[in-house]
Image (cartoon, grey):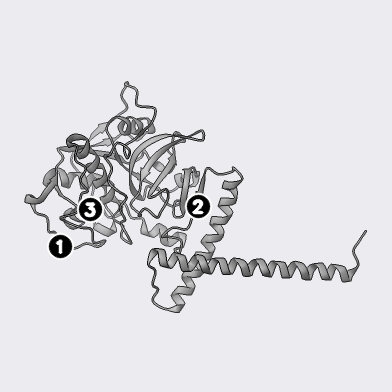
Amino acid sequence: MALPENEKKIIMRVLVILASVVLAINAATDRELWTEFKQNFGRDYRNLREEQLRFSVFQNNLRNIEEHNEKYNNGEASYYLAVTPFTDMTTEEFQNMLNFSAAAKPVLEPIAVHTASVEASPSSINWVSKKVVTGVKNQGQCGSCWSFSATGAVEGAYAKKTGKLVSLSEQNLMDCDTADAACSGGSMINAFNYIAKHGIESEANYPYQAKQTSCKFSSSKVAAKISGYKRVSASEAALLDAVGKIGPIAVGINADKIQNYGGGVFDNTACSSGQVNHGVLAVGYGKADGKDYWLVKNSWGASWGEKGYIRIVRNKNNQCHIASDASYPVV
């Protein structure tokens, strides 16, 4: 039986009022989250126009986060999203920040290659718990991921060899490694090549500035040296062998889809369509809720991801290209 026209109008008005209330609540919640975001990440925009633009971008990202997390809550996704230091950036802006090897000069010297051996690797491993990984660092608004990936691998190798865990200087590499381009990109192989020839100072002696400055390297202050480096054969089997038996491994990934990663095992085939554009550190592997994963240390601060880490799905067609550009130093 059809409703009378006046009842239809009343119902429509009620629905419009309810929708308005929901929108008002969402707007209020968005404003609260926006205020919290600015406080947490020290945002201070140049003018009201820029802040309004950033708030609009922030709101769009919030809707995407909510939509994805509904799938996560329904068991349709293995990872969830959250507000991160990049939630006021558009996808394009975020991707433009990822430089990796964009301006790096290729190493012309022959490079030894690590391949998977017949000896079985451990079923799981976590080099963080083995005390050979320094705390999570933050590269800031500078495309210096390559330097953090390289120092992380050297820190791990040096700690395994000497028993001393020393935080090494990314700034030393940014200022003095002329084969790379500081905030405009670089490669871990180039960084290893520099360290093999010169050594590297500690973070304490040569602190991070998030910008290129003049080279202040002093050979008398070298905190770690390496004898060489190896590239890992581009397969997950070879990477598993290296991480399981060698230690933390410098890897390149496609990071286009991890802007607002909050936690869980990241499994998104879209990250395999782009190119490698971000340097990180593979520090372990394991299995959770039926999914094999790589444990990866990032350089975006501890407020991103799982306290600065991300778990990326493993044994799924080299997702995010995690095994495509892997290397490590030899101490």
User: x and y percent of residue 296 in the render?
Assistant: 37, 43
Residue that numbered label 2 is attached to: 81
User: x and y percent of residue 328 in the render?
Assistant: 25, 38
Circle nearer the N terminus (1, 2): 2
At numbered mark 3, what does the secondary structure look like: helix, strand or loop? helix
Mark closer to the observer (3, 1): 3
Which of the two residues, 195 or 77, is positioned nearer the viewer here? 77
Instruction: Tell which residue pokes out farthest to the top in this image.
Output: 118
User: x and y percent of residue 79 in the render?
Assistant: 50, 45
Mark closer to the observer (1, 2): 2
Q: Is residue 174 visible?
A: yes
Circle nearer the N terminus (2, 3): 2
Residue that numbered label 1 is attached to: 214
- Crowdedness of circle 2 by 10 Å Cα count: few (<14), some, many (20+)? many
- Distance, label 2 to label 3, CA atoms, is 29 Å
Residue 170 is marked as 3
